[in-house]
Image (cartoon, rainbow, N blue to C red):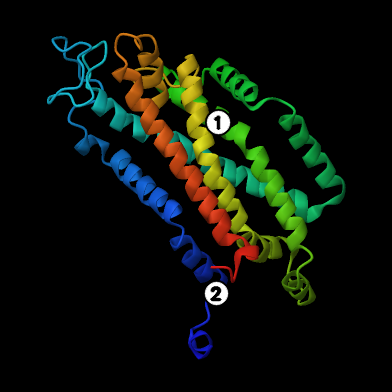
């Protein structure tokens, strides 16, 4: 009893991080994601070849000492394209998650804070977007953006359109979560204390409420990243997302699908990489949810 009383008290964030560190699956997933980010950032130095380098004398070769994961139909090293694909897939997923976080947080915070007619109108817009299937909404946004012809470079146009499609289709869930958290936080004592000393509503919202609701939002964002990776890969697999010479895991899977029976190595590598990444983000998201859940305090 005396040892427990002598232990220094931990803050909410310190206690959450402590419980997260005790979750082995979440920590292994975190280390894997960090490793994946390092590989993506330094892909130019890690990959043995450029993702565009063609070797016409080594077309569709299986794994060997020279090409660890084999080559594709143009003689390009599959390992190099997989490493560069990690850069593109992670960049698209993280960028779209951050954009959806910004849009969803601002939209949901304003809706929950002001309430009344403002909240009803803003939530009806969210309900309308929710009624459209996510994949259909992404395709619709991409088609509209492609028709605008904002970029002459087709590669830049394809990349920007997929980023916009994923971002504009994934913020609605975050907006609902933020709205619910703001509605709950409005009734807290620290908000009433801030109002009693004459603090302005927008100051209370951005200074007090938003920082206190970021825990659940960050958890949801962590779970949103693998969804974005999956949607980008699926759109690229269908031929609606990134296209060559871009090298994402969806592009590689699309290229390997046509030759899967004769050359299965072309689809196995990107599929395994994608599956491991999705599992890692899912386990990390579950670990963060358990770590930041107030009901779990004192159980670990």
Q: Few, some or many C-alpha atoms within 10 Å of disc 2 (few <14, some 14-19, many ≥20)?
A: few
Q: Residue at x 34, y 29 (%)?
A: 85
Q: Is residue 246 visible?
A: no
Residue 11 circle label: 2
Q: Secondary structure at mark 2?
A: loop
Alpha-carbon neighbours of circle 1 within 10 Å: few (<14), some, or many (≥20)?
Answer: many
Q: Is residue 283 above or below residue 130?
A: below
- Location of the N terminus (image quadrant): bottom right
Name the image quarter holding residue 253.
top left
How far across and down, in percent of the image, does residue 146 sit? 54, 18
Residue to which mark 1 is pinned: 166
* Residue at 39% from the left image edge and 26% from the top image edge: 271
* Helix, strand or loop for disc 1: helix
Which residue extends farthest bottom? Answer: 2
Question: Which mark sits nearer the N-terminus, 2 or 1?
Answer: 2
Are the residues flagged by discs 2 and 1 in contact, CB closer than 8 Å? no
Residue 57 appears left or right of 163: left
In front here: 300 or 214? 300
**Vertical relation: 152 (above or below) 31:** above
């Amino acid at each position: 009893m005396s040892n427990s009383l002598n232990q220094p008290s931990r803050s909410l964030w310190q206690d959450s991080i402590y419980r997260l560190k005790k979750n082995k699956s979440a920590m292994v997933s975190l280390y894997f994601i960090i490793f994946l980010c390092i590989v993506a950032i330094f892909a130019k130095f890690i990959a043995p070849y450029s993702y565009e380098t063609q070797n016409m004398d080594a077309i569709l070769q299986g794994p060997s000492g020279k090409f660890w994961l084999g080559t594709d139909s143009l003689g390009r090293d599959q390992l190099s394209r997989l490493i560069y694909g990690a850069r593109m897939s992670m960049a698209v997923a993280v960028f779209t998650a951050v954009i959806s976080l910004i849009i969803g947080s601002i939209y949901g915070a304003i809706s929950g804070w002001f309430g009344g007619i403002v909240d009803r109108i803003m939530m009806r817009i969210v309900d309308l977007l929710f009624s459209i299937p996510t994949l259909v909404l992404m395709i619709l946004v991409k088609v509209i953006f492609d028709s605008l012809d904002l970029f002459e470079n087709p590669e830049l146009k394809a990349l920007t359109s997929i980023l916009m499609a994923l971002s504009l289709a994934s913020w609605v869930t975050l907006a609902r979560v933020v709205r619910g958290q703001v509605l709950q936080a409005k009734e807290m004592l620290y908000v009433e204390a801030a109002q009693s000393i004459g603090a302005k509503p927008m100051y209370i919202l951005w200074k007090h409420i938003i920082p206190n609701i970021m825990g659940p939002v960050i958890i949801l964002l962590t779970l949103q990243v693998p969804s974005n990776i999956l949607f980008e890969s699926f759109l690229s697999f269908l031929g609606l997302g990134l296209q060559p010479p871009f090298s994402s895991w969806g592009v590689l899977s699309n290229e390997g699908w046509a030759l899967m029976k004769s050359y299965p190595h072309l689809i196995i590598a990107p599929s395994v990489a994608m599956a491991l990444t999705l599992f890692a983000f899912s386990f990390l998201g579950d670990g963060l949810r358990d770590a930041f859940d107030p009901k779990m305090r004192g159980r670990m």
